[in-house]
Amino acid sequence: MCRLAAITSRDYFSPMENVIALETMKEGHDGSGMGLILKGLGGEFKELKDYPVLSGICSEAGLKTLDDYMNKLGFKMKYTWTPKTRPVKGIESRDYYFARVYDYPDMYRDKPLDEKESLLMKTRLSLRKLGEKDESIIVFSFYPDILALKEVGDPLQLAEFFGLEKTSLKAKIILAQGRQNTNYAINLYACHPFFIQGYSTMTNGENTAFVPIREFLMGRGFPGYIGYNSDSEVFCHILHYTCRQLGYPLHYYKDVVTPLKQAEIEDRPDREAVTFLKMSLRPLCIDGPNCVIGFTPDGSCFMLQDTKKLRPGVVGGVKGKFGLMSEECGLDSAVPGRERSVDVFPMKYDMAIVTPDAEEVTVWNQLLG
Amino acid sequence: MEPASRLDNNHELAVKDFPYIIRWRDDRCTRCGRCTAVCPMYSIEPAVVVKRTLHSEGPTPEPKTTRRVETIVKQTTDIGRYCTGCGTCTLVCPNEAIEPEYNPQHKFNFHKNLGGHPYRRGGRRNDPAPSTLDRLRFTRISMLTDPALDAGRHEFRIRTYLGRVLPAEELPLRVENGRLELDTASGKFIPPVREIYPVIIGSMSIGALSPNMWEGLAMGITYLNEVEGMPVVMCSGEGGIPQRLLKSRFIKYFIPQIASGYFGWDEIVRTIPHMVEDPCAIEIKYGQGAKPGDGGLLMAHKVLKLIAEIRGVPMGVDLPSPPTHQTKYSIEEAVAKMIQSMSMAWGFRVPVYPKISGSRTAKAVLNNLVRNPYAAAMSIDGDDGGTGAAYNVSMDSMGHPIASNIRECYLDLVAQGKQNELPLIAAGGVGKKGNLAANAAALFMLGASAVSIGKYIMQAAAQCFGDEYNRCNVCNLGKCPRGITTQDPKLYRRLDPDKVAERVVEVYKSLDVELKKIFAPMGRSTELPIGMSDGISADDPAIAERLKISYAC
């Protein structure tokens, strides 16, 4: 089972905190991989918030293809970050890990955000397609203020491999997941957390409803709903579809993925809307067993469980720093000084939401609306 | 050479030509006469034979011959009175002295066309081989990758939607104070949708069924809804619904059907102003899997007082339903108009959907319905579906199996991103081998939102004798020995409606448990696993390829 360690903070912190939390929870995972998504970047990226960051891995040949392609589109590179990798036994190094900050092509510089988002996504998908066959280019995200790092191996060893301890890389929200997807073929595109246009999620558990959900998402006509090398990617796309495409407030994500029974809906103040929403989005019911942790563009972080609540998950912290973890010991490692008695273990009807800048954690109850 | 007089039997059939041969045991028979009295076909009759017996008695036994006239039970070789193998004789025999035995060498189909009349019968396709549905297995089991659910402990919601579902993008919702509200001012039409149990009792008419059978089914359905909280619904079949039911609050559990004969619809339409509840839905029958492209016929001897009243016709006349609706000349216009008219009759509050027979052209119909905002679903009846009366050739040779037909239609909807908008209802051979839950679950995973059963419920709830070895199958003659498909009070009095209702409830409760036993190990409980095609495998590579599922051996 995947171990999940998300931290959201008012102040910048190092991804090592997430890695150590993962290490604390190691008893339950097989250390087969790690994925990191950072939002609210600090360090060198602090002054470059408005520019998109392309995160990925390239071979020597892939790098040339990538540069040619980006130049052709008119993207101008402003800054490059590469981890100072060092050999670690058991980790097979690839040629070039990068997070590159670009300036938009001239004609896009003053365009509205959604047009820019569309350009960034299409560019990422094209790069993915260019390098997919020979794995010469692997791109995880291309979005302002977002950085992604993924590789196969034990999380702690990977941290050493990437030199995370010494790097100046910092962020205000970091999602970390400590296992390669083993339900399907091992592939870096199958490694969560997943990210699309400001929305990110990671999940533990197997998604038994994967095929109907995938087919439904792929039928929405949105070019970003592709990939699905892992059954977990759909959770991120459902979030994006619910909040961005349909414009629903965040808590309706819970109503979409774990719909209530009709009798329960009758007591909701928004019963009419929830009834129709349940029917229209029926194929997006996740059916579990899953614990989903994610963030939205405004910096809210959340955790929810499937209806059976067969996966562990806990949220806790202090004002200014909260952890959303798959296990309590991970939380102890990330926020040791908190009041443990007020930790939140979201149950079947709950959605724990940590407000932006880690102000507070609120529990939205699905039965009450 | 034999004299000609000895060859007089030459044009007669031998018992060996018949599909069932009566095995009668002289030594056990008490000559009570129950079997010959009960035989619906008069296939067996009392007869006399002369028997020669040898006796040896006394201190110095000497064989003596005596001739005695004895009564026996004899099977006729008159094809008009052929033994259907129903086994009612066995049922009534107090001494296990008689039973019909299937004869695989029979030549029945060569001869059952006397007078130039092709063989007509009831039942379903006479093919006892396992259907495609029975060759599918549920192979995706959650165990260690994730814990399996517990069918006995976890909560399962086995429900589906009947009605057209708007895509989320078209829902008239707006955000107000952080909540979604229905925008009533938008004037957007939201089609009616019912939440129902996904196994429907399919269309069997009052007329085809006896009053006791129909009443039993109706009581069973009502009990399931009112007491068990299972929203099981039932389609009326063509031929109307009793006024008392139409005006009752229980009509919400029924789906009145309109078919090409429009029987009973004057009465239904006239009752609309007096109805206190809307029906669950309206089914427009364009085709039937058992006899695709063919009409129906309720024979005059079934049209007694009750039936005549419900259907609004004189008593004792043949009631043919034409093969096609007389008003239908194109799917784009006439079908759309009919759906719209039926919707309008109930103020657009009732889902209206068509039923067609399984066909290679089903996708064309589907794509038309997808574009019709009032079409609430599409029901496809495969070639293993049952009927009360049809030509044998239609039943055995016409139509399309349901498995690939429903799969194709579902995948067509997936390609358009509309799989959640127009529910597909699959029928035709569901539970043919008794595996109702497995067949239904497989159809859901192939893409059906619901399934319909007919023959299965007759077999399970009223012990219908019919099977795919052409046993019984005389539903068309009004001679049903179980009292299921007859209007003869002497026959239908045998059927206790309370017992039928009880069995309907038992069947559904056990079906519910079995569905959970399938869904639980697959990790599905909250929503019906519609289109979860990674959950099933076929035992034949060709089937797997056609259905776009995996092959497992």
Image (cartoon, coloured by chain):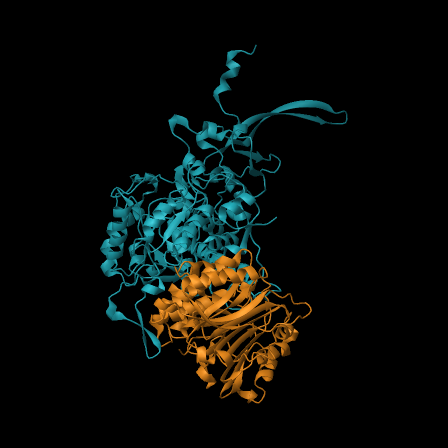
Q: Nearer the viewer, residue B391 or A132?
A: A132
Quadrant assignment, res B251: bottom left
Residue furthest to the right: B59
Q: Is residue A164 left or right of residue B170?
A: right
On screen, B489 above or below A91?
Answer: above
Quadrant assignment, res A269: bottom left
Quadrant where the N terminus of chain A sits is bottom right
Quadrant where the C terminus of chain A sits is bottom left
Q: Nearer the viewer, residue A116 or A31?
A: A116
Residue B101: x %, y % from top left: 56, 36
Rendered colour, chain B = cyan
On screen, A166 above or below B84?
Answer: below
Residue sitting at 27 percent across and 50 percent down? Answer: B336
Residue B295: x %, y % from top left: 33, 40
Residue A281: x %, y % from top left: 40, 64
Residue sitting at 35 percent across and 75 percent down? Answer: A270
Residue A41 in view, yes or no = yes
Rendered colour, chain A = orange
